[in-house]
Image (cartoon, grey):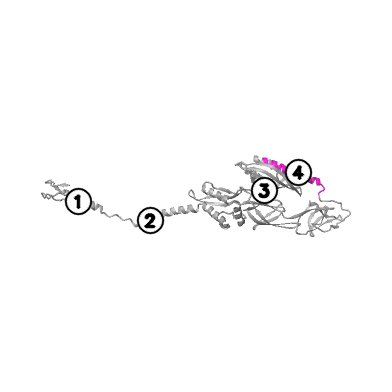
């Protein structure tokens, strides 16, 4: 409340004059001025945002929204669980192409898509899926292997940087096996699924590339002085874990011993000279089983007269041998079949013992990681020499051990020219670095040649393997 400055009369708050004495009052005027100024300040208009700033705020909001959306989209697209779910859906619906779309296939490898899909299905897809899910949940397990119940590597999950440190893509690579082929005849052309390779030496093991489990058709062609050979068969390629798959091809043919009283006579086949003397052959063959081959021998005596034997075919053997007997009085009876059968038997026995001695040394070499222990048993620079040197060398940093329990020679074949093939049955126990044990029962064939310093192993072919976890 205000009071008159002259008479002290109580005045209303905004009075400009005293109603008692009429004196002017300044306080009311000041109050009104202050209020007017306050009102004036409160009613000042706000300055509007410029168009440029409005567009900037809107653009920033859109960009932030896009980044957030992109993050969720990329995260969703690169989630490895998407692939696993798609594979599982394709498997349950039996869709081969949809399944293979989610995995990386080695384009250089042989694959029968339907058979491979069936192989995955029959070899425990449920367990494989669980492993894939576990890998997807654990972001640290890359690269990670997925294996079937027999320990065979089926997939490898790989992590690749899409945006380093932020986003990654994941590949599920289907793992093929190395495919090793061989033939019992030299210069054999083998064809599998439009891919071809030539095996130049008999029993030579060579890489054919890679293959996924499944059924394939293999054809083989070869020829020699005795005729043409063909081979055609449906084969089942089965995974051997991390080991190569060995595919030996046996072109069917027959071998025959022979007798002649003129070892220096020349062999003729279907009327054409082989330009080889009978003395240069240990046996004749192989002959194609579905073709008739005509054979005879010719010899010129000291007077230049040509003598011929009767013409026979490869099945015209007498007492187990083809007969090239010359009807001449002055010929010295002789036979080019080896008369020293005892020496041949001794060599066969020595070849068998060489393999068994090698097996004893090989067990020691594996467990000590010392290749030099088996080197004396092998032909230098041969396939066996190169393969075992690499295999034993690769064991240096692995905590593996081997226990050989049985080595048995099941067959031996004399190929002539001091060369033998020795077939074996080998049983052993393999223990890995986790102390997990696997029982192996394996069939092998050793190609052995006698050199000046004794027998040497040239090739080792794995024919069959049966494995079981202990």
Q: CA distance from mark 3 to mark 1?
A: 110 Å
- CA–CA distance between discs 2 and 1? 44 Å
Task: Please tell me whether mark 3 or mark 4 is closer to you in this view.
Answer: 3
Label 4 element class:
helix
Magenta region:
338-364
Task: Find out whether the residues at labels 3 and 4 contact each other: C-beta distance under 8 Å.
Answer: no
Q: How far apart are the alpha carbons under marks 1 and 4?
A: 131 Å
Query: Marks 1 and 2: in contact by CB < 8 Å?
Result: no
What is the quadrant of the C terminus in the image?
top right
Q: Which residue is mark 3?
A: 465
Residue 43, given in percent of the width and then of the height, sits at 25, 54
Q: Is residue 222 left or right of residue 59?
A: right
Q: Earlier in the sequence, mark 2 or mark 4?
A: 2
What residue does disc 1 label?
Answer: 33
Task: Tell whether 112 sits left or right of 224.
Answer: left
What residue is pinned by disc 4?
350
Between the residue at mark 3 and the residue at mark 4, the CA separation in whole angstroms equals 26 Å
Question: Label 2 to label 3, Cα distance in Å?
Answer: 71 Å
Secondary-structure class at tag 1: helix
Left or right side of 65 for 404: right
Whether pointer 3 and pointer 1 mark residues with C-beta atoms closer than 8 Å, the reply is no
Mark carried by residue 58: 2
Whole-angstrom CA distance, mark 2 to mark 4, is 92 Å
């Amino acid at each position: 409340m205000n009071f008159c400055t002259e008479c002290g009369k109580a005045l209303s708050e905004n009075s400009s004059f005293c109603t008692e004495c009429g004196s002017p009052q300044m306080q009311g005027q000041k109050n009104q001025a202050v209020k007017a100024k306050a009102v004036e300040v409160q009613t000042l208009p706000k300055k509007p945002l410029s168009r440029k700033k409005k567009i900037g705020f809107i653009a920033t909001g859109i960009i932030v929204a896009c980044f957030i959306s992109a993050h969720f989209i990329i995260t969703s697209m690169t989630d490895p669980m998407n692939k696993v779910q798609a594979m599982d859906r394709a498997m349950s619906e039996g869709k081969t192409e949809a399944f293979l779309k989610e995995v990386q296939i080695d384009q250089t490898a042989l694959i029968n898509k339907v058979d491979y899909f069936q192989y995955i299905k029959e070899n425990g897809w449920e367990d494989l899926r669980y492993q894939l899910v576990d890998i997807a949940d654990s972001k640290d397990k890359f690269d990670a292997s997925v294996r079937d119940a027999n320990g065979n590597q089926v997939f490898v999950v790989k992590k690749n940087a899409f945006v380093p440190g932020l986003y990654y893509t994941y590949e599920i690579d289907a793992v093929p096996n190395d495919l090793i082929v061989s033939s019992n005849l030299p210069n054999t052309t083998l064809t599998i699924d439009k891919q071809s390779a030539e095996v130049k030496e008999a029993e030579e093991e060579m890489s054919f590339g890679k293959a996924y489990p499944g059924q394939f058709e293999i054809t083989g062609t070869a020829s020699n002085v005795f005729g043409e050979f063909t081979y055609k068969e449906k084969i089942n390629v089965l995974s051997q874990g991390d080991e190569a798959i060995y595919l030996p091809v046996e072109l069917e043919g027959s071998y025959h011993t022979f007798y002649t009283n003129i070892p220096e006579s020349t062999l003729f086949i279907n009327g054409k000279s082989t330009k080889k003397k009978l003395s240069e052959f240990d046996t004749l063959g192989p002959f194609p089983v579905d073709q008739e081959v005509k054979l005879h021998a010719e010899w010129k005596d000291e007077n230049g007269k040509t003598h011929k034997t009767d013409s026979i075919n490869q099945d015209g053997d007498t007492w187990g041998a083809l007969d090239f007997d010359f009807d001449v009085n002055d010929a010295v009876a002789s036979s080019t079949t080896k008369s020293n059968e005892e020496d041949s038997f001794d060599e066969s026995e020595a070849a068998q013992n060489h393999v068994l001695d090698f097996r004893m040394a090989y067990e020691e070499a594996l467990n000590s990681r010392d290749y030099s222990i088996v080197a004396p048993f092998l032909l230098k620079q041969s396939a066996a020499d190169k393969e075992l040197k690499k295999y034993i060398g690769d064991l240096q940093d692995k905590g593996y051990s081997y226990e050989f329990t049985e080595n048995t020679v099941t067959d031996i074949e004399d190929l002539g020219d001091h060369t033998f093939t020795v077939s074996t049955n080998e049983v052993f126990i393999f223990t890995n670095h986790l102390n997990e044990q696997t029982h192996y029962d394996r069939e092998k064939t050793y190609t052995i040649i006698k050199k000046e310093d004794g027998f040497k192993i040239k090739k080792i072919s794995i024919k069959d393997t049966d494995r079981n976890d202990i």
